Image (tube, rainbow, N blue to C red):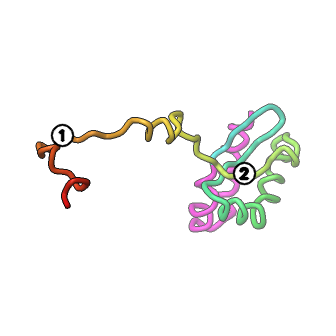
Amino acid sequence: MSQSNWQNCLKHLERELPAEDFNTWIRPLQVKASTGRTALLAPNEYVRDYISLNHLERIRDIFEHLGSSRESVVVDVNRPRSPTTPASKAAAVPYRAHTGLDKRYTFKNFV
């Protein structure tokens, strides 16, 4: 339901806002719906803050008109998932390059 509400909301906002504003601030938002909550995910904190200050009330009005509660719509930052392999495990295996150099001649025994 929230995905269709978001699509309807986008149509309303596209008609109301200048194209530059819509493309800069609204189009990058992604929607994540869960039970009783709709999170609009912004690409960074700057966009989140701008949406919260300038457009969130209008977005909540549209959602309320479409049958959702105002408080169910929030703006958050889309955080990328952390890699599955920790860096410490990746660094545990030393890299050994085959250089073709004589192993007897090292910096340690140079002098």
Question: Looking at the image, which residue is at 84% across and 41% down?
Answer: 68
- Answer with left or right where residue 37 lies relative to residue 90: right
Label whose residue precedes the other's in the sequence (2 or 1): 2
Q: Picture coordinates of residue 1 (x, y %)?
A: 74, 33
Residue 20 lies, with reference to residue 100, above or below; the image says: below
Q: Which mark is residue 76?
A: 2
Q: Picture coordinates of residue 50 (x, y %)?
A: 71, 66
Spatial CA distance of label 2 from label 1 is: 49 Å
Nearest the eye: 85 or 105: 105
Q: Secondary structure at mark 1?
A: loop
Q: Quadrant of the C terminus?
A: bottom left
Q: Picture coordinates of residue 95 (x, y %)?
A: 31, 40
Question: Looking at the image, which residue is at 83% across and 53% down?
Answer: 61
Q: Picture coordinates of residue 10 (x, y %)?
A: 66, 51
Residue 36 lies, with reference to residue 44, above or below; the image says: above
Q: Is residue 18 located in the magenta-colored stretch of the structure?
A: yes
Q: Amino acid at mark 1?
A: His
**Range drawn in magenta:** 1-29
Closest to the camera, between mark 2 and mark 1, is 1
Crowding at label 1, few (<14), some or many (≥20) Cα neighbours within 10 Å? few
Number of marks in the image? 2
Q: Is residue 43 located in the magenta-colored stretch of the structure?
A: no
Q: Which secondary structure class fits the magenta region best?
A: helix
Q: Amino acid at mark 2?
A: Asp
Q: Quarter-wise, where is residue 54 in the image? A: bottom right
Question: Looking at the image, which residue is at 78% across and 66% down?
Answer: 53
Q: Secondary structure at mark 2?
A: strand
Crowding at label 2, few (<14), some or many (≥20) Cα neighbours within 10 Å? many
What residue would you read off at disc 1? Answer: 98
Question: Looking at the image, which residue is at 23% across and 56% down?
Answer: 107
